[in-house]
Image (tube, grey):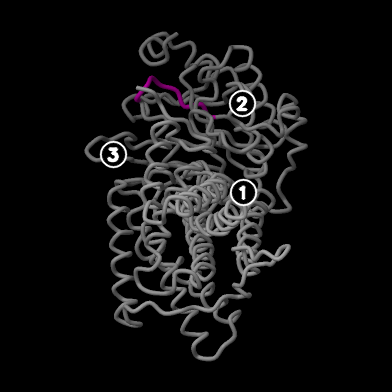
Amino acid sequence: MLEVENLVTDYGPVRAVDSVCLQVEEGKVTAVLGANGAGKTSLLRTISGLEQASSGRVSLTGEDITHTAVEDIVRRGLAHVPEGRGVIAELTVEENLRLGGLWRRKQSASPQDMYELFPALRERRGKPAATLSGGERQMLSLGRALMGRPRVLLLDEPSLGLAPRITAQIMALVRQLCDEQGLAVLLVEQNARSALSIADTGVVLDLGRVVATEDPERLADDTDLRHAYLGF
Amino acid sequence: MTQFLNLTLSGISTGAIYAAVALALVLIWRATRIVNFAQGAMLMFTTFLASVVIEAGAPYWVGLLAALAGALVLGVVVERVLVRRVESAPPLNAVIVTLGLLVLLEAAAGMIWGNTPRSFPAAFSIQGFKVGGTRLLFSPNDLFVVLVVLAVAGGLALLFRMTTLGLRMRAAAFAPEVARLQGVRVGRMFTIGWALAALVGSLAGVLIAPSVFVGPNQFDSILIYAFVAAVLGGLDSPLGAIVGGVILGLVLSYVSGYEGSALAPLAALVVLVATLMIRPSGLFSSTRERRV
């Protein structure tokens, strides 16, 4: 579904993503793990077109999207939920949701669908997103991404700053979406334990390079790797 | 009492013009965080266009349409050719570009149409309404100006609140990167924002032209007052632009009427300084200043 080959991203003289290769299959979760500064967010931003790749290739369902504009990548079925949740604070909850489905026109999901998925948002529908709690913002951000019925979802640190209970709910929902709708998810997380609990594949990044690509169980069993890169 | 009523009505009418130009400034500020110092010159240019069409024998309304059409084109060209190159650059670059455009348009207008101000017809009678034997300083044309500005403000509110285009434009203005991730073509939204602002400004130019005449520098003071109105209302608030415009119109009308028109610019400066000292974000801004 999504394939990344030898992807390189440079910020001036600094190489943030260094020859990264990975794949995300339909209905599967690939978790990208690593410490701060490992290049996880830069990797997602390059895949979704927010940063220009210096070299390498990104393809979505076989089509090269490496140098495609962000707006066109979105229209090919890739949704990116950015770090820090990325809700537009000045818009209401419902406006944020509608925004996510505008490009799909009549084929978009409806806000009602999202209220069923995230009941907490229903009663806040007319309120500015600025008034939401961290967990509600994460739900809104995820719901907005799902409004366009994407085929691939990039999730950047969805657990950041959230209570463990909310994090568990969001992770369970992501797994459910993969299993029931065949969504392909590329999940970037510092919370390795939480990400591995729902992942089919784990990719460990360090200083922009892939240092391991393994089954979650094997990653969790590898004591050296866990201590060196995953912090548990 | 009659004088107070006259000054109030006159203030509302002039304030409506300041409000319209302030609205144009706010539209651009919200979309691109640029203060368009060329707004006055842009509306001057399109008002000249209307003047040429009307002097050629066309009806007033055809002249108005020509100005509006010219404004749309001018707004698109300015954004695409000049502003897009500095949208991501340091703010000073945009200031220099819009100031340069102001000088360019005023010089070009002087070369094409001359520097002597020319008269401009009004849409309706400029003779004041008569109430109980007293003729007010408020004419059918003034009423037309107020109604048109209210209609434009209402139309823009509907556009932004009730349409998908408005939702896209607001998203692009508030969070361009997030908007792009939702498939919004942000550059196109900025272009539409500039075109809309030029349209509103152009309308204000045609509406005020019968009072100030048309010349390359005739609209400079309008831009300054509109800027004060926009700061007073809050640079990112369309509602603030309308309220700020009317408040400033009233203040300047009272000062001119009771103390003499020479003090009007000073009064505007006092309003600007007081706003910046007491409430720097303006009356209706959604953003708040940070105390340090």
Residue in the picture at 28% in, 39% down: A11
Residue in the picture at 73% in, 39% down: A111
Q: Is residue B198 above or below residue B291?
A: below
- Give the chain of mark 2: A
Which of the labelled discs sits on residue A131, or is there none? 2
Sequence-first disc among 2 and 3: 3
Q: Is residue B92 above or below residue B82?
A: above
- Residue B6 location, x and y as percent? 59, 57
Residue A220 highlighted magenta (yes or no): no
Which residue is tagged 1? B167
Residue type for callout 1? Leu
Closer-to-camera residue (B228/A83): B228
Location of the C terminus of chain B by quadrant is: top left
- Residue A101 location, x and y as percent? 66, 46
Could you give the CA–CA distance between mark 2 and mark 3, rounded to whole angstroms? 35 Å
Which residue is tagged 3? A11
**Residues at marks 1 and 2, common chain?**
no
Callout 3 environment at 10 Å: few (<14), some (14 to 19), or many (20+)? few
- Give the chain of mark 1: B
> For the residues carrying marks 2 and 3, which lies nearer the camera in this image?
2
Q: What stretch is highlighted in magenta?
A: A30-37
Contact, mark 3 vs mark 1 (Cβ under 8 Å): no
Residue type for callout 3? Tyr
